[in-house]
Structures are given as structure tokens and as C-alpha cells.
Image (tube, rainbow, N blue to C red):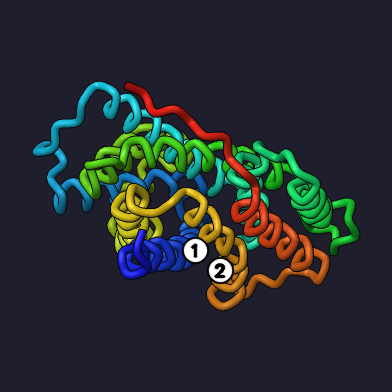
Amino acid sequence: MRPQTILVPVLLVTLGMVFTQTGASFAKMLFPLVGASGATALRLTLAALVLVIVFRPWRYRPDGRQKRAVLLYGVAMGSMNLFFYSALFHIPLGLAVALEFTGPLAVALFGARRPLDFFWIVLAVGGFALLLPWSGFDGDVSLIGIVLALCAGACWAGYIVFGQRAGTGGGPHIAALGVGTAAIIALPFGIAEAGTALLDPAIWPLGLGVALLSSAIPYALDMVALPKIPSRLFGILMSGQPALAALSGLVILGERLSAMQLAGMAAIIFASIGATATIARPKVTPEP
């Protein structure tokens, strides 16, 4: 792939990451009003409405295989958001994203074979250990938040895999279908937690801003970029998510991480970059 061809999807993925973490910071402001699940449901529902109006996905006719991929993509997306926002209720944004990132990182490390590959595993495990409460932090790291962030990481891996399968040939139309499915998954949980508070017009402007920044814009950008970018390069780019999250949490929310937490986050980022760039993947025979 020529450099000028790859530049646009790289910029789209990077821009989507910035939007995502900025939106996540603003989403925490909704928690006192509608709770974590309510914020998730509000974000995904408003994002789905925007994407459906803009891209009119009913004009797109996916085949049977792509329909299954879109369904799994939406389920992974909805579950990922529910777990992640619940984690944000308990732990800082930067820490939540670093822990969430162990999901796709584990997928990258699955093909480890050489000694260098196992170095990345050791580095990732060491970084993860530094993020745990018994690693000498200030004592305010919630174990529940850690577990929820790890669950979000597992769903994130599914989001990447099924997003690549579903996105081929569909572009932002697939993003609209996927976010709509995710909204259907999240809405019952949001209603159960927030009830009629979700209908309060006073929170809709902030909810719409979060929906655009965290869902509508980055998911649409991902659907345009994913089919055009090698999965290895996508993984390297995504490795910057924890750093962007920590910066957004600091600037917007005033969240500060300890030196140990920052060291753990850096270890995970470097392990992700190294693993994505150097671990050999087995060749897959194309399906007939």
C-alpha cells in the first residue's frame, strides 16, 4: 500500500481516538445525573439517531455473512461501552483505558513464538501489575473498576475483529447499523438505572455532545478506515489510546495518576506497539 494511500485512514483513526477520549471525559459529567449505564444508553441512542439520519443505512443491503458480522459488531460495541462506563464510575479515565487495552493486546500477543515476543508479554504483565491496587498506589483504586475495565477490554477485541469483517464495503452505513444495535443492547440497562431522567431535556445537549464525540464521529471514521488499513498498523495506532485518555482526564477532569500508574501505562503502550510490530501472524488461507 502506497504511503499517500495509507495516510488518510491513519489520520482518520488518530482523529477518532482523540474524539473518543475527549467524549469519555465529558461523559463522566453525566454520571451524577443518569449514572454510568444511563450515560451509556443516552450516548449510544443519540449517536445511533444521528448516524441513521445522516447515512440512511436502510439503503444498504448487506449479505447474510455481513449481517451476522454487523450483529456481533454491535453486541461487542454495546457491551464494551456498558462495561467501560461502569469502570469509569470507579477509576480514572487513563487507568480504565490502560486496563481495557489489555484485551486487544492479549489478541496481539496470542501468536507469540520467538524470545522477543515473550519479552513483550513480560513487559505487558509487568505494566498490568503496576496498575493493580497492591502495587503501592495511593490506595484509591477500586478492584470493581479494574474488573469492569478488563471486561470492556475483552469486548474491545471483539469490536476490532467484527468491525473489520462488517466494515468491508459498507463504510459509515455499517457504523450506523452497529451503533443502532449497540444502543438496543444498552438501552434496557440505562432505563433500569436512570428511568425517566433520560427524558430530561436539560441533559440532552451534553448527551448529544458525548454521543457525537464518543460514538457517532469515531465509529464512522473507524468504519471508513478499518477496511483500508492493515490490522498491524491499526493496532500500533490504537496503542496510543491510554496516553490520550490520561491526557484528556487530566485536562478536562483534573484526574491525576501516580508515578507507578504512569509507568504501568507506559509499559502496556510499549508492549502493544512492540507486539503489534514484531509478532509474526500465521498466514490464513482465504475462504473460497
Q: Secondary structure at mark 1?
A: helix
2 or 1: tag closer to the N-terminus: 1
Question: What x and y, as percent, mark residue 181?
Answer: 32, 34
Q: Quadrant of residue 150?
A: top right
Amino acid at circle 2? Leu
The residue lying at 40 percent from left, 58 percent from top is: 214
Seen in the image, is 65 located left or right of residue 254?
left
Point out the image quarter for the N terminus: bottom left
The residue lying at 48 percent from left, 44 percent from top is: 81
Closer-to-camera residue (186/280): 280
Amino acid at circle 1? Gln
Whether residues under marks 2 and 1 lie with C-beta atoms below 8 angstroms apart, the answer is yes
**Residue 202 appears in view:** no
Closer-to-camera residue (237/76): 237
- For disc 2, the marked residue is 244
**Residue 251 appears in view:** yes
Point out the image quarter for the C terminus: top left
- For disc 1, the marked residue is 21
Q: Residues within 10 Å of mark 2 (few under 14, many from 20)?
A: many
Q: Which mark is residue 203?
A: none
Q: Count up the numbered dots.
A: 2
Asked if residue 249 is positioned above or below residue 144 in the image, the reply reads below
Q: Residue furthest bottom?
A: 251
The residue lying at 55 percent from left, 41 percent from top is: 83
Seen in the image, is 261 located left or right of residue 149?
right
Q: Secondary structure at mark 2?
A: helix
Q: Residues within 10 Å of mark 1 (few under 14, many from 20)?
A: many
Question: What x and y, as percent, mark residue 102?
Answer: 66, 47
Alpha carbons under labels 2 and 1: distance apart: 7 Å
The residue lying at 51 percent from left, 65 percent from top is: 25
Question: What x and y, as percent, mark residue 104?
Answer: 58, 44
Q: Quadrant of residue 86?
A: top right
